Amino acid sequence: YGFKDSSVIVHNGNTLYSDKANDSGSKIGDSWETTYQADVTSNYPWGTNDWDKGLADPHAYYGAGVFKVNGSNLNITYGTRRAVFVNPG
């Protein structure tokens, strides 16, 4: 389950991930494979690029989701992919 307004959604019934990079250096809506430095004031609807400041932050849910585990044999896979930023200057 992806939280309302979170960047992650359920795919194929049981896979939870974001279709876009969760990084202030990327433009939301673009593919994580083509992440680049943003030239906008804020990528996020609340007006700043801050979203990962701890549980007290009202946007702490961003990029989060929950799932239920059943059975006695548990196998969870998680990971991240990050585009390499190149400084042109």
Image (tube, helix red, strand yellow):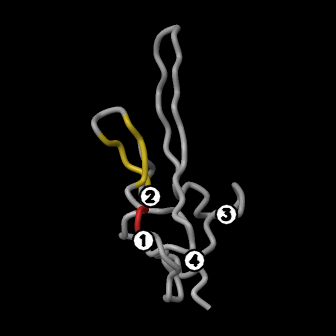
* Numbered tag placed on residue 13 in the rendering: none
Quote the CA–CA distance across marks 1 and 3: 20 Å
Depicted 65 relative to depicted 30: above or below: above
Q: Which residue is mark 4?
A: 86
Observer-nearest of 68 and 25: 25
Q: Position of residue 65 (x, y in %)?
A: 49, 44
Tell me where residue 24 appears, x and y as whole percent.
57, 73
The amino acid at mark 4 is Val
Q: Which residue is mark 2?
A: 7
User: In this rendering, is residue 80 above or below 44?
Assistant: above
- Marks 2 and 3 sit apart, C-alpha to C-alpha, by 16 Å
* Disc 1 crowd, CA 10 A, few/some/many (<14, 14-19, 20+): some
The residue type indicated by label 2 comes to Ser
Tell me if label 2 and label 1 are in contact, CB under 8 Å. Answer: yes
Residue carrying label 3: 57
Answer with mark 4 or mark 2, whichever residue precedes in sequence.
2
Choose between 86 and 25: the one closer to the eye: 86
The secondary structure type at the circle numbered 3 is loop
Residue at the spot of label 1: 28
For the N terminus, the image quarter is top left
Residue at x 57% of width, y 77% of height: 86
Q: Position of residue 32 (x, y in %)?
A: 43, 62
Q: Label 4: how many residues lie within 10 Å, few (<14), some (14-19) or many (20+)?
A: few
Q: CA distance from mark 1 to mark 4?
A: 18 Å
